Image: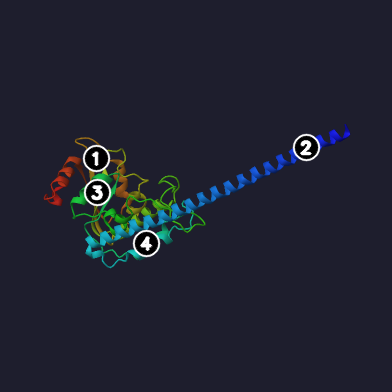
């Protein structure tokens, strides 16, 4: 009996050892599978971020070259230098901690001739103002300049401890104050306002309660940089629906008058949207007759 019990014990011990070995093999196999999976994921992430960077670079270079080709006055600009200065502003930085000053080198890289008497600012009128300038060359918005044209509609950001440029996973306009895209447009708007000269026009929305919104880029950045030494007048085109909306006596527009230098001539005219739409569809109409 003792021999039989020892035999059973030996068999039980072998089975236990076999189970332990099999369990260890299963754990090792799982570790290997996880390691391979993580490697594939990391490789995919690196590949995707690299692809995003190259894709954005191509888009920016292509738009830059197309603009220069169609605007001979911008021929002195170098698209590769513009790309390099652009990247330096945000690559490797927290996408919520990119101040507008980070784009100073980019702004200074671009050569832009002044366009006195033709500069058109806007607030809450994006579609109609760009429909208008697309058909007319008598006025120029920020988005019609080299940098504005290139960056319009694009999203980008960097990340800390990364040399990559990302086009997804970036903070939205209101997610944080100093986000990558918002800071660019703030800085570009400041440069556009700094260059304003002669007679300046602003197209504002007369269909909303506050045409001159105190939180808009026009109010917080552009108007504050209008210089009486360079600007003669500010003309507000208040776009309204037929016989509806605010008027030029609106309190917010009175605030606008208080904001600008008293040496600047100020005038405002409420213009039906249909009148501007007519000028858009009839480009032979003189610009002065559009409002």
Please state if 184 lies on the left or on the right of 142 as rendered.
Answer: right
Relative horizontal placement of residue 30, taking residue 143 as reference (left or right): right
* Mark 4 or mark 1: whose residue is earlier in sequence: 4
Residue 193 or 57: which is nearer the viewer? 57
In the image, which disc is placed on residue 11? 2
Residue 218, image x, y percentages: 33, 50
Between disc 3 and disc 1, the foreground one is 3
Question: Badge 2: few (under 14), some or many (20 or more) residues near its Cα, within 10 Å?
Answer: few
Q: CA distance from mark 2 to mark 1?
A: 98 Å
- What percent of the width, then of the height, locates residue 225? 34, 57
Closer to the camera: disc 2 or disc 3?
A: 2
x and y, in percent, of residue 121 in the image: 27, 51
Give residue 247's mark. Answer: 1
In terms of depth relative to the viewer, which is nearer, 234 or 72? 72
Q: Is residue 207 visible?
A: yes
Q: Secondary structure at mark 1?
A: loop
Whole-angstrom CA distance, mark 2 to mark 3, is 86 Å
Q: Is residue 237 above or below residue 137?
A: above
- Label 3 and label 4: CA atoms lie apart by 25 Å
Query: For the residue labelled by badge 3, is the local secondary structure a helix, a strand or a loop?
Result: helix
**Nearer the viewer's eye, disc 4 or disc 2?**
2
Specify whether residue 226 is in view.
Answer: no
| Cα distance in 3D space between marks 4 and 2 | 73 Å
Q: Mark 4: few, some, or many residues within 10 Å (few <14, many ≥20)?
A: some
Labels 3 and 4: the sequence-earlier one? 4
Residue at image mark 4: 83
Distance of label 3 from label 1 (alpha carbons): 23 Å
Say which of marks 3 and 4 sits in front: 4
Q: Which quarter of the picture shows residue 8?
A: top right
Which element type, helix, strand or loop, lies under badge 4? helix
> According to the image, label 3 marks what residue?
130
Quick one: 16 or 1, which is closer to the camera? 1
């Amino acid at each position: 009996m003792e021999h039989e019990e020892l035999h059973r014990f030996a068999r039980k011990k072998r089975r236990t050892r076999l189970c332990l070995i099999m369990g260890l093999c299963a754990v090792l196999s799982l570790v290997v599978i996880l390691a391979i999976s993580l490697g594939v994921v990391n490789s995919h992430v690196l590949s995707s971020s690299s692809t995003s960077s190259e894709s954005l670079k191509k888009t920016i270079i292509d738009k830059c070259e197309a603009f220069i080709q169609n605007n001979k006055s911008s021929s002195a600009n170098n698209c590769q230098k513009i790309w390099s200065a652009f990247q330096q502003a945000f690559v490797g930085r927290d996408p919520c901690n990119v101040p507008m000053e980070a784009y100073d080198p980019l702004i200074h890289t671009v050569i832009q001739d002044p366009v006195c008497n033709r500069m058109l600012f806007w607030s809450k009128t994006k579609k109609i103002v760009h429909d208008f300038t697309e058909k007319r060359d008598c006025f120029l918005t920020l988005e019609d300049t080299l940098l504005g044209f290139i960056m319009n509609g694009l999203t980008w950001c960097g990340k800390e401890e990364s040399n990559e440029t990302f086009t997804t996973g970036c903070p939205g306009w209101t997610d944080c104050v100093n986000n990558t895209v918002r800071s660019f447009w703030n800085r570009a708007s400041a440069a556009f306002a700094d260059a304003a000269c002669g007679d300046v026009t602003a197209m504002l929305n007369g269909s909303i309660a506050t045409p001159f919104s105190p939180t808009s880029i026009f109010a917080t950045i552009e108007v504050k940089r209008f210089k009486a030494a360079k600007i003669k007048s500010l003309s507000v085109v208040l776009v309204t629906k037929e016989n509806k909306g605010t008027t030029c006596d609106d309190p917010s527009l009175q605030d606008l008058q208080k904001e600008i230098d008293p040496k600047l001539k100020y005038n405002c005219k409420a213009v039906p949207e249909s009148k501007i739409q007519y000028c858009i569809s009839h480009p032979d109409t003189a610009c002065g007759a559009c409002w």
